[in-house]
Image: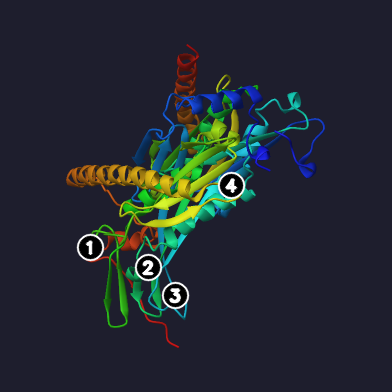
Amino acid sequence: KKMAEAPPVSVNEKKFIENALRKGIRVDGRKALTMRKLQIQFGRKAGTVEVSLGKTRVFSACSADVVKPYPDRPSEGFLRLFVDFSPMASPYFEHNRPSGRSVQLSRMVQRGIRESNAVDTESLCILSGSRVWEIRCDVRVLDDDGNLGDCANIAAVCSLLHFRRPDVTVVGDRVTLHSVDQRQPVQLAMHHIPIIISFGIIAEDESLVMIDPNRKETTVSTAELSFTVNKHKEICGIHKIGGTPLNPNKILKYANVAIENATAITEKIEKLLAEEEKSQQKRSRRGESVYTNPIEAFIDNPEMEEEKGETKKKMEEEED
Amino acid sequence: MRVSRKDENIHNATVQVFVKPITGNEDIEHMLMSTMVEDCLSSVILVKMHPLTRIQIVIQLLDVDGSILSCAINGAMMGLIDAGIQCNKLLAAVTVTQLDSEMIVDPSKDDEKRASVVVNLAFNANDQQIILSNTNGLLSKSDYHNIINTAQKAALKVEKFMRKFFESTMR
């Protein structure tokens, strides 16, 4: 089944990768436990980001909408995460028809962020029982050169950290959404930043482990191990599905490696976000609009744009 | 690529275009855009050279600030050239808006909103003939002619850029 997902790797290449790994080096010159270069490029719109790990590229964008909450959870907002494997990334991806592996990767990213409560959904409540924010994060895979889980996760997390939702005022039962021109939009409350680190394992006689495998290395590995961890040394998820059996001690050892790398990545993300914040302030001082309204209702109504003073969108409590 | 049974054509390649939005699922406007790009490119690609195959073009929108259809067509054209798919024409697409007597070439989102008509045109770079013409709004015949003339000049610039880009990458 794995073979149908990627072009086959010849036996010569497989042996070459294995032998190189035995000596502790990889085909592209990395050491066994060195990750590829991580590049993060924030877009013009708040919440858009393009992340690349070597040649693997992923794009992510966030949007917000106001909806009714579930009746049994009246003060919790929604965080929806979608990972889309576009045929642009690889000819083995079909449009709107994710393969088993794509679904697995997408669930791994979703669970890492949602189930570990990375985003505080209670802070997304506007009016308990009637109005909450639904934050939707769309991750689009642009180029597949291995380790899509990692890359998609970093993209989703950066997108959520970069995103700004409109500010809200609640007076009694009246909810007022402020356009981004009138009031500075607000960051999402995030408890922690989960990062996925993946390993490819070639377990023939001894376990040969490589971090951040590229596409050929993934095809050649007999087992894959992914950790969702954060810099506070908490494990949000361990994924080892099928493949050759592993010694549990080894798994714990690599969990530590994962945590080290996750900490380094988290620091890089925070640094780049701070730089982006500064450049955004410079741009807004120059008069350029930095934030765009994520909710179309503000932009489509030309009369509201012309109104001087407070531009408000009023939403009234529904009568039963 | 291999084409599915239902799309098989024993004489020609099947051209499929997908336009994916920035956020959310595909909307009717994206499906319309993909149909327009598909029809445009099907007449340009030499489909008879690859029967029983599928030529798939995926357009992922990263940031939308006006002129999106012509941007998509230009991008798809450059992608086809880069992929080495034989085409019998080089397409250059331009969007022009008109407000009163003011013409704006390559409008931004705000320009498009304020305009009274938005015209998307795609030309064959060699002989300046129109492959695609799509208008949204009201305009007079003479205005349309003026817009075509302006767009043809702009299309020449687009074509020049494409040639310069590919010639420099060849080296």
Is the residue under label 3 in contact with that under label 2 (CB below 8 Å)?
A: no
Q: Within 10 angstroms of label 1, few (less than 14), some, or many (20 or more) residues?
A: few
Q: Is residue A233 left or right of residue A79?
A: left
Q: The residue tagged with tag 2: helix, strand or loop?
A: helix
The nearer-to-camera label among 2 and 3 is: 2
The colouring scheme, among rainbow, by chain, secondary structure or one colour, is rainbow
Q: Which residue position is annotated with label 3?
A: A69
Q: Earlier in the sequence, mark 2 or mark 1?
A: 2
Dot 2 and dot 1 within a common chain: yes
Q: Residue furthest right?
A: B10
Q: Is residue B46 above or below residue A41?
A: above
> Disc 2 or disc 1, which is closer to the eye?
2
Among the two numbered marks 1 and 3 on one chain, the one whose residue lies closer to the N terminus? 3
Mark 1 is on which residue type?
Answer: Lys
Can residue B38 be spotted in the picture? yes
Q: Secondary structure at mark 4?
A: loop
